[in-house]
Amino acid sequence: MNKITVAILLVLFSAACSTTGSGSGSGSGQGAQQAVSAQPAENEQRQRAKVHSELGSLYMLDGRSAIALEEARIALSADSNYAPAYNLLGLIHMVLNEPKLAEENFEKAMRLAPGDPEISNNFGWFLCQNGREQRSISYFMAAAKNPLYTAPTKPYTNAGVCSVRLKDDKAAENYLMTALRLSPTNTQALFWLADIAYRQGRHAEARQWTTDIEKMMEPTAEVIWLVLRIERKLGNREAEARYATQLRRRFPGSPEQRLLAQGQFE
């Protein structure tokens, strides 16, 4: 998957994967911190910082990084201690492929709000994307087990993806299954469970996971390519040809379409 796309989908808003209610961690939640971005503003400066950080997040999702950067700076001019603004800067610099600046801003956000589950999740994803997958897991778990975090499916999904990168499929499946229990419509978790099952030769199971994805969303190039290869392994030539046609028609020039043209199925 495209690195920037995954960073945005898994880290920032992942609306299709979010849940409501308390997190899955055990215990009473004593000492747990709600995400600062979810807390009401305590004064006019904090309210201004909150509004501009939220605007910046929306601009970033829309691909307008320069405007998002300016919104984050306006937020910090209103309240220089507003952790979500530094978190937003971290995400923006990550998208702009500026890892040094991204890390500096994530660390500032963590210092200002060390128990913030949203920031922990995002910093974990940064670490995972920059070769520190093992270290990232502890940040995902800190976010996931915070009983005040309203979207624990996200860090469990991210932990699963990073475990795949670590070639630890067993741990990855455990994290992804937990993410799916928390949110049965979590298509990212479904995709990676299908990917693991495919690589392990459990092709019928992999096909069931992708069938669930297709019921919930218009499949992406990544999903179509995975389904095509699953059908190929299952010997369903007609279905394989149908997905090949769909990939060529809907995603010409995509990395997946190029692999198909080159016959690189593995």
Image (tube, rainbow, N blue to C red):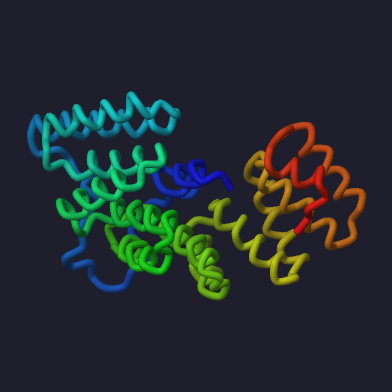
259 relative to 120 in the view: left or right: right
The residue shown at (71%, 44%) is: 256
Residue 69 placement (x, y as % from top left): 29, 30
Q: In this orientation, does residue 252 appear?
A: yes
The residue shown at (67%, 53%) is: 212
Q: In this orientation, does residue 15 appear?
A: no
Between residues 251 and 146, which one lies in front from this camera angle?
Answer: 251
Residue 35 placement (x, y as % from top left): 25, 50
Between residues 53 and 218, which one lies in front from this camera angle?
Answer: 53
Give the vertical position of 251 relative to 10 (above or below). above
199 relative to 42 in the view: left or right: right
The residue shown at (23%, 42%) is: 86
Between residues 244 and 266, which one lies in front from this camera angle?
Answer: 266
Residue 81 placement (x, y as % from top left): 12, 42
Residue extending furthest left? 43
Give the vertical position of 1 relative to 167 (above or below). above
State the image quarter where residue 167 is shown.
Answer: bottom right
The residue shown at (75%, 41%) is: 257
Residue 227 placement (x, y as % from top left): 75, 52
Give the vertical position of 175 relative to 35 (above or below). below
